[in-house]
Image (cartoon, grey):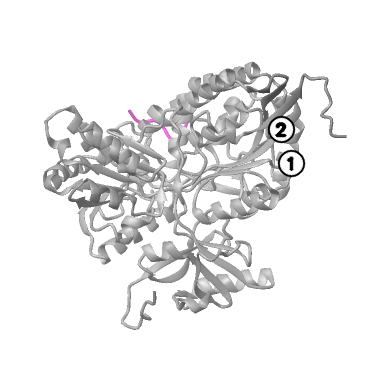
């Protein structure tokens, strides 16, 4: 089926011509009085206007967050869990609307937002509701009459900067643990995807107490910096590229606050010969596992963008994969049959085209795709790129730099040692995939790969409860797991003496 | 860090130079460029107020564009094959905390094919 575009009269998504910031539980016009146009990458046509805020708007959001801070921080885990569960329920009951809005603004196929982004976002709030409820502080008996009590206390007000590739799910990954730990937050969505989170705020704005979640849209150079460098935040979280990651750490250092960062990767996806040992579901799953590089049109930090295939199965295995890649349906993201939609922006699709050109100049062999896809009709101005496969060597630029598009760089390896060497020959360490029927080898590879997440005989699963974060330059911190509560709280130690006896020193 | 021998590996198009001139005039001094990597806006040339990013020993000065320094992480530059780069502008929104290259414009960087005149690499 095909959903009508948001704003069309039979669409499940209502669109106002203009949106405001969400501050202190209210829709507030930006103090700048300026707005920018938000485009759908599917057609290149405007969706709506969103605020082009300035630093003053960040201050207003921080005012609101600080006003709410004490009361929210003093709620019980039971009360916070009730709010988080209600948020999850609201997301679920508006799942279709949110899925269509997310798809139209980002370009990701609605089959993905319906099956993954939105259900996972709802589940994330439930997971942290449960984590908050089950959280226990600790007590240590130092000696018979001295006890160390450890309480977890909220940080206060935090800043969170969201990427464009999963605007709602990444917002959930950040907002849920912050709230569960008793913090208020000021959120800045990514510039290419400012709107879907505002649609979410329409849904949950009355559930979350005023000032607990605030959303401000505008240019990163102004409001991103104003938020990250503010002395009024107690922690900053960011997902994006490395230079902004460094700036964030620098501002955090200046204010002596913690930062968590997720900065991307160039994830290897490794296929050993034995995947072809039988004609069965597992082989079918492994083929799909390689093709998952096209998931979310490759705009995923953990995109399995380097396929390492054992050389003795290369021809046969890649033959099957290429057949599956050729069957990928590209088109309107709102068509449930579409498997790959447009890239998020014009600049993104142009960047992808230039990388492929660089790869070909470097001598890579083009096995599939390699061009912008020009779809007709209403999609003629959309930002589409064909699912592409380049064969080459790991020292080529297309194997080393995150392209953030549906471009797979494939190479071969002789044995396990070489597979591990190639896998680790990258500046990054976010994700990896290992496919084999040999459990011991899977374990050895999993432990040997220097990455925060090694999918073993699976890929691109993001269940709440599985820690996600980077080794090397891929970042600091682990999201998607209750350990994130540590990143959003500070430990209060009460060291209590039950003895009446003086020390005897003075 | 120009003694590393790579300064001058970046050139700019006329449009980029025009954008730089406007930014410098507005700032009353130079801006700086640092080429990024990784998620989302990775490999974008981030344009920042001069001195905004603390430059470390791991950064390489690869170009000077009308008085504005252009840096890249040395390890990154290595794995990219130490290419010559061309700074340009294109329509779009800047990534991360980068300054825009004018109204509705952003900086972008293109990789130039090697030429026989490229300086020899030194260790």
Element carrying mark 2: loop
Residue at 57% over, 26% down: A203
* Residue A263 visible in the current orientation: yes
Which quadrant holds residue A66?
top right
Q: Between residue B116 and residue A333, name the one nearer to us.
A: B116
- From the viewer's perspective, tell me whether residue A346 is left or right of residue A318: right
* Highlighted magenta segment, given as a residue range: A1-10
Query: Residue A337: horizontal and vertical position, in percent?
Result: 29, 32
Note whether B103 is above or below A288 in the view shown.
below
Residue farthest to the right, as pictured? A506
Name the mark on residue A60.
1
Name the mark on residue A24.
2
* Quadrant (top left, top right, bottom left, bottom right) of the C terminus of chain A: top right
Name the mark on residue A176.
none
Note whether B110 is above or below A416 in the view shown.
below
Q: Is residue A6 magenta?
A: yes
The numbered mark, 2 or 1, whose residue comes first in the sequence reads 2
Residue at 70% over, 21% down: A75
Give me the chain letter of mark 2. Answer: A
Q: Between residue A361 and residue A109, name the one nearer to us.
A: A361
Element carrying mark 1: helix
Query: Residue A135: horizontal and vertical position, in percent?
Result: 58, 21
Dot 2 and dot 1 residues touching (CB under 8 Å): yes
| Crowding at mark 1 (Cα within 10 Å: few <14, some 14-19, many 20+) | some
């Amino acid at each position: 089926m095909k959903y009508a575009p948001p704003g069309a009269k039979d669409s499940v998504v209502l669109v106002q011509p203009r949106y405001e910031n969400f501050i202190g539980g209210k829709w507030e016009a930006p103090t700048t009085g300026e707005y920018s146009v938000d485009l759908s990458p599917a057609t290149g046509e405007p969706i709506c206007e969103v605020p082009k805020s300035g630093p003053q708007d960040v201050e207003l959001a921080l005012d609101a967050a600080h006003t709410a801070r004490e009361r929210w921080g003093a709620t019980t885990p039971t009360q916070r869990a009730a709010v988080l569960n209600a948020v999850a329920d609201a997301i679920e009951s508006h799942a279709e609307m949110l899925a269509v809005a997310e798809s139209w603004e980002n370009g990701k196929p609605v089959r993905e937002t319906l099956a993954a982004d939105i259900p996972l976002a709802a589940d994330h709030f439930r997971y942290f509701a449960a984590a908050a409820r089950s959280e226990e502080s600790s007590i240590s008996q130092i000696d018979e009459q001295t006890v160390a009590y450890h309480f977890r206390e909220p940080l206060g007000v935090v800043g969170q900067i969201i990427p464009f590739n999963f605007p709602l799910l990444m917002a959930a990954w950040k907002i849920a643990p912050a709230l569960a730990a008793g913090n208020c937050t000021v959120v800045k969505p990514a510039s290419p995807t400012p709107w879907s989170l505002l649609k979410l705020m329409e849904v949950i704005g009355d559930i979350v107490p005023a000032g607990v979640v605030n959303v401000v849209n505008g240019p990163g150079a102004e409001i991103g910096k104003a938020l990250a460098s503010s002395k009024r935040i107690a922690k900053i979280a960011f997902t994006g590229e490395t230079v902004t990651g460094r700036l964030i750490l620098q501002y955090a250092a200046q204010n002596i606050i913690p930062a968590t960062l997720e900065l991307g990767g160039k994830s290897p996806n490794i296929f050993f010969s034995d995947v072809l040992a039988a004609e069965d579901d597992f082989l079918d799953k492994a083929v799909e596992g390689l093709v998952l590089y096209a998931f979310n049109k490759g705009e995923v930090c953990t995109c399995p963008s380097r396929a390492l295939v054992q050389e003795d199965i290369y021809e046969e295995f890649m033959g099957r994969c290429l057949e599956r890649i050729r069957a990928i349906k590209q088109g309107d993201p709102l068509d449930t049959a579409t498997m790959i939609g447009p890239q998020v922006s014009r600049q993104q699709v142009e960047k992808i085209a230039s990388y492929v050109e660089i790869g070909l100049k470097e001598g890579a062999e083009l096995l599939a795709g390699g061009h912008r896809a020009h779809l007709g009709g209403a999609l003629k101005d959309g930002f589409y790129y064909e699912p592409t496969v380049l064969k080459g060597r790991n020292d080529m630029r297309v194997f080393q730099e995150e392209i953030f598009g549906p471009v797979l760089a494939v190479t071969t390896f002789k044995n396990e040692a070489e597979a591990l060497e190639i896998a680790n020959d990258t500046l990054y360490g976010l994700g990896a995939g290992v496919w084999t029927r040999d459990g011991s080898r899977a374990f050895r590879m999993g432990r040997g790969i220097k990455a925060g997440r090694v999918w073993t005989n699976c890929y691109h699963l993001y269940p709440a409860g599985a820690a996600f974060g980077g080794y090397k330059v891929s970042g600091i911190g682990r999201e998607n797991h209750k350990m994130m509560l540590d990143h959003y709280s500070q430990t209060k130690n009460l060291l209590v003496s039950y003895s009446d006896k003086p020390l005897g020193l003075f | 860090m120009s003694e590393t021998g790579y300064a001058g590996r970046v050139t700019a198009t006329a449009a980029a130079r025009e954008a730089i001139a406007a930014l410098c005039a507005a700032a009353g001094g130079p801006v700086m460029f640092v080429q990024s990597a990784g998620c989302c806006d990775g490999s974008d040339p981030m344009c920042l107020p001069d001195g905004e990013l603390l430059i470390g020993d791991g950064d390489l000065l690869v170009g000077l564009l009308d008085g504005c320094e252009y840096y890249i992480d040395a390890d990154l530059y290595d794995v990219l094959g130490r290419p010559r780069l061309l700074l340009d502008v294109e329509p779009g929104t800047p990534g991360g905390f980068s300054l825009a290259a004018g109204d509705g414009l952003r900086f972008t960087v293109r990789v130039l094919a090697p030429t026989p005149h490229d300086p020899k690499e030194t260790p």
